[in-house]
Amino acid sequence: MELKQKLAVLADAAKYDASCASSGAAPRNSLGSQGVGSTEGMGICHSYAPDGRCISLLKVLLTNFCLYDCLYCVNRVSSNVPRARFSVDEVVQLTLDFYRRNYIEGLFLSSGIIRSADYTMEQVTEVARVLREEHDFRGYIHLKTIPDASPELLARAGRYADRLSINLELPTVEGLQALAPEKDASGIRRSMARLRLLIDGARDESRPTAPRAAAGLPPKPSAAPPFARSQSTQIIVGADPADDRTILQTSGAMYASYGLRRVYYSAFSPIPDAARTLPLQAPPLEREHRLYQADWLMRFYGFEADEIAGAPGGMLDLDVDPKLAWALRHRERFPVDVNRAPRELLLRVPGLGVKAVERILASRRSRRLRTDDLARMRVPAAKVLPFVVLADHRPGRALEASSLAARLRPPPRQASLFDTAPP
């Protein structure tokens, strides 16, 4: 098979992997050296698929041959899809050629499992090694690791990658056993724990040493070897019956236990010749969007998974964002006095983001805030005012109005002939 045909097959096979963002990459560039690439400036070039997914231009699999038969995977061993396999040198050359043509600024490399987990991991790692050591490539490299690979290979991969990731696949152990019985849920978590230890250890070793004796000299940088800065994972949404509360609880546990940089949510895509146990239709992409919003609330706003997805049934409201949905369910906690409330409470007001809250805290040190002050901070007044008290504003009985939820929901949109039919 020609290289172009391989690229068509293996780039298409990689589009189902959402965890390709480059945030958190170590700063690296080729200025003043003979190296190639950079992780600075505009970062990674991304394209957007018709379904809205963000895809790096060189986001490929090493191969889509696979020993496993995961029911939700288009590359499962029993799938009747065209197969292809790159050699290590082919991926290296493609990366360099695409970079020099300004098509990409990094590489996202995953793979089906061939021969064994260790053999596959060696091949994936070898691509990164050749790029870094033989071509002095300074661009971004994200490697998808194989959970069952040996700890030594995971450690070696981290020396060359900016980020490592391991797909959790499904939010529950039961779901994984039902749809991917060959995969070991405890083994996936063990690999995540190993990576966390390696990442934390490298971070500790790379901290600057104590300031040098001479005044004015900066701390001496550590000579510790580089290692991937972070790890991430991906959860498939809608392939099994797990509700949003379960998915968010799993994500919360992943952040707390393994120090993940991100959890990515990928709406299940129906595949050809799918098993009968899989749903016939994909879940609405709005569900994926709401999960990302809820994930953001957990990481930066102090919410717990049970609070966000607290409605009966454990599903997020698709009509309004999770923070507004929570506020409408807990009207007894409002209104919040903008001039006196602590930061934690202000962060729970719909329409107030982290930056707006910081501006409020800074401004109220010098004066009592009024409605005009919120307008100058460019917060959405229609969304915020029913939930707050200001020097010149009290919501009165607006919070108790039965029409409040309907008033704050986005206006209805005219249906299109091309909309997906409801399930």
Image (cartoon, helix red, strand yellow):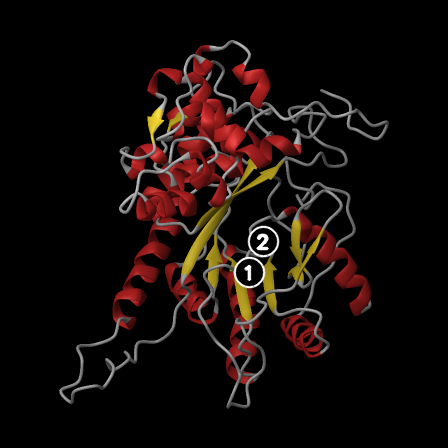
Q: What percent of the width, then of the height, locates residue 375?
A: 49, 40
Quick one: 262 or 384, which is closer to the camera? Answer: 384
Q: Residue furthest left?
A: 213
Lower position in the chain sequence, tag 1 or tag 2: 2
From what the image shows, is residue 423 above or below residue 384? Answer: above
Count of marks overlaid on the render: 2
**Disc 2 secondary structure class:** loop
Pointer 1 with pointer 2, Cβ within 8 A: yes
> Label 2 is placed on what type of residue?
Ile
Which residue is at 48% across, 67% downward? 161
Cα separation, mark 1 vs mark 2, equals: 6 Å
Q: What percent of the width, then of the height, locates residue 120?
A: 55, 60
Q: Residue furthest right?
A: 417
What residue is pinned by disc 2?
113
What residue is pinned by disc 1?
120
Quarter of the image containing the N terminus?
A: bottom right
Which residue is at 50% across, 90% downward? 32
* Numbered label attached to residue 345: none
Q: What percent of the width, then of the height, locates residue 207?
A: 26, 71
Q: Residues within 10 Å of mark 2 (few under 14, many from 20)?
A: many
Q: Is residue 201 left or right of residue 389?
A: left
Q: Is residue 161 left or right of residue 104?
A: left
Quick one: 220 or 165, which is closer to the camera? Answer: 220
Residue 114 seen from this side: yes
Which residue is at 35% across, 76% downward? 225
> Label 1 is placed on what type of residue?
Thr
Q: Is residue 122 left or right of residue 203?
A: right
